[in-house]
Image (cartoon, grey):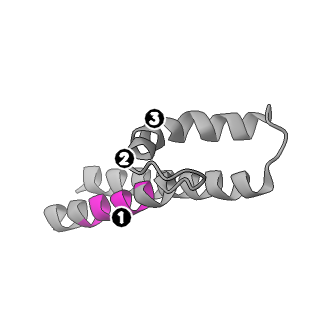
C-alpha cells in the first residue's frame, strides 16, 4: 500500500512539473535560468516522444497528452491498489 501512495505522489509531483513547464513557457524567462533548465531536463524525456506522436506545426500538445496519460496511470494505480 505504501508503494501505491509513493507512486501516486511521484506522478502528482510530475504533473505539477509539467504544468510549471507550460506556465514557464508562457513567461519565457532567461533561457539559462537554473529552474527552467531543471524543469526541461525533468520533463523532456517524456514530452519528446509524445511530441512526435502529435506533429502539429506551431502547437505543442505534448504537455496535455503527458498530463492526460499521467491521470490515466494514476487512476489505474488507484484501482489496482484498492
Cβ–Cβ below 8 Å for labels 3 and 2?
Answer: no
Q: Is residue 82 magenta?
A: no
Residue under label 2: 53
Assess disc 1: are there few (<14), some (14-19) or many (≥20) residues with their C-alpha within 10 Å of its C-alpha. some
What whole-number distance in Å separates the C-alpha atoms at marks 2 and 1? 18 Å
- Figure quadrant of the C terminus: bottom left
Which secondary structure dominates the residues rendered in magenta? helix
Residues in magenta? 66-75
Residue under label 1: 71
Residue under label 3: 45
Assess disc 3: are there few (<14), some (14-19) or many (≥20) residues with their C-alpha within 10 Å of its C-alpha. few
Q: Is residue 16 left or right of residue 54?
A: right
Q: Nearer the viewer, mark 2 or mark 1?
A: 2
Instruction: Say whether disc 1 or disc 3 marks the residue closer to the N-terminus.
Output: 3
Q: Residue at x 55, y 58 (%)?
A: 16
Give the secondary structure at mark 1. helix
Amino acid at each position: 500500500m505504501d508503494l501505491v501512495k509513493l507512486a501516486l505522489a511521484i506522478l502528482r509531483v510530475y504533473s505539477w512539473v509539467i504544468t510549471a513547464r507550460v506556465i514557464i513557457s508562457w513567461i519565457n524567462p532567461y533561457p539559462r535560468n537554473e529552474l527552467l533548465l531543471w524543469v526541461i531536463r525533468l520533463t523532456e524525456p517524456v514530452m519528446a516522444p509524445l511530441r512526435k506522436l502529435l506533429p502539429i506545426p506551431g502547437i505543442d500538445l505534448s504537455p496535455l497528452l503527458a498530463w492526460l496519460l499521467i491521470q490515466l496511470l494514476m487512476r489505474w494505480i488507484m484501482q489496482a491498489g484498492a
